[in-house]
Amino acid sequence: MKYIFTIIITITFFMCFILKKNIKAVTALISTFLILLIFYPKASINGAKEGINLWMFIVIPSLLPFFIINDMLMSLKVPENIAKLFAPVIKLLFNTTGYGAYVFIMSIFSGYPSGAKIVNDLIKSKKISVKEGQKILTFSSTSGPLFIIGAVGSGMLKYSIAGYILYISHILGAILNGILFRFILKDADKNKFNYNNNFYSENYYSSSEIFSKAISSSLITCGLIGGYIIMFSVIIYLLREIQYFDIIGYLLQKFFHLSSFFTFTIKSLFETSLEISNGAKIISLMDKSFTYKMCLLSFIIAFSGLSIIGQVSGILSKSGINIKLYVISKVFHGIFSSLLCFIFIMLLNIRVFVFNIKNSASVLNVIVLLELLLIIILILNIISYKIKFSKN
């Protein structure tokens, strides 16, 4: 029975992704998981509990403050100032308007799926076009330092330096990805919206109105993210219950005669690509070399996992962004990040760390990041105003 479930889930999943009109495939996939919920209620309940804990005690405390601040900054027209300041650099690197700089700065501090939310807000307010939003997402959909340096580096790998290597590789990989898609998404060069036309607004709101609107919008987004986290947590528990990943590995080795190392790598990618928190934990516990684990971690964090992709899809559902193209860009981001990670490890000649700085990145909590982010944005805002008034 477990083999039948595995085959049905695999076939219907790929049909959902490949086919344009995939109603039957989606129905079959949902029906299969409904049957699994009935067959394995304990696994589904445990998965839901795990998802709720992850959402309530990790995701909301780390993301909600960033979302509220971003919405307030959007209302105060701060992105326009940063866009004008960085326009020449962003145009040179990625061939987009300066709004890409604002999205990039916010994303590298707050992590997934902040970049998608900000792009959606910019498209909704007609500050950028859909095509430009698509291009901005290729370099501004990133994980944050709290997760990579704190959770993965210090927490899972027990080496903070490993977290810094992963984070630097991740950010540089995003930049290389954006440069690549600068030439692929050439149609996005012509943006029918100009930030100069949106610099001033006739709508003025009081501080309390801006704050209330920011909280309301951010809570709705966090609720959407929570739904995806809980459902994907349930799915992961159900797949483990039917030994889905072990069966996939066995079938690959049996029918394609792959080596045990190659089979293990593909099986690991399948298992860890669902949700990056669980995926990173699985990789960190593998009995493999440090280089192997670091490169695999770098790819998975950049790819972000199906749970994050689902959250991004939900946030951007009404924006017009092509999600399949977004997924392809995340695969390239993963390739760039893992290659850079490998190069850094080889250059630094890192094999095994002979020291252990426990919890050295624990100081990178939400409050410190918020303060640093606000200081940077404030400085950029002041510089932008000085440049604007010096020209007048």
Image (cartoon, rainbow, N blue to C red):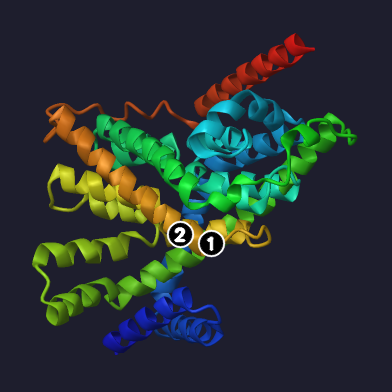
Which residue is rendered at x = 26% and y = 39% of the image? 341
For the residue pair 58 and 391, the one nearer the viewer reads as 391
Is 85 on the left-hand or right-hand side of 301? right
Q: Which mark is residue 74?
A: none
For the residue pair 223 and 193, the one nearer the viewer reads as 193
Q: Is residue 38 above or below residue 249?
A: below
Which residue is rendered at x = 28% and y = 43% of the image? 156
Quarter of the image with the C terminus in it: top right
Which residue is rendered at x = 12% and y = 28% of the image? 354
Quarter of the image with the N terminus in it: bottom left
Residue behind mark 2: 327
Residue behind mark 1: 323
x and y, in percent, of residue 383 in the image? 65, 15
Is 265 on the left-hand or right-hand side of 325? left
Among the 4 quarters of the image, the one containing residue 251: bottom left
Q: Is residue 189 above or below residue 324?
A: above
For the residue pair 223 and 181, the one nearer the viewer reads as 181
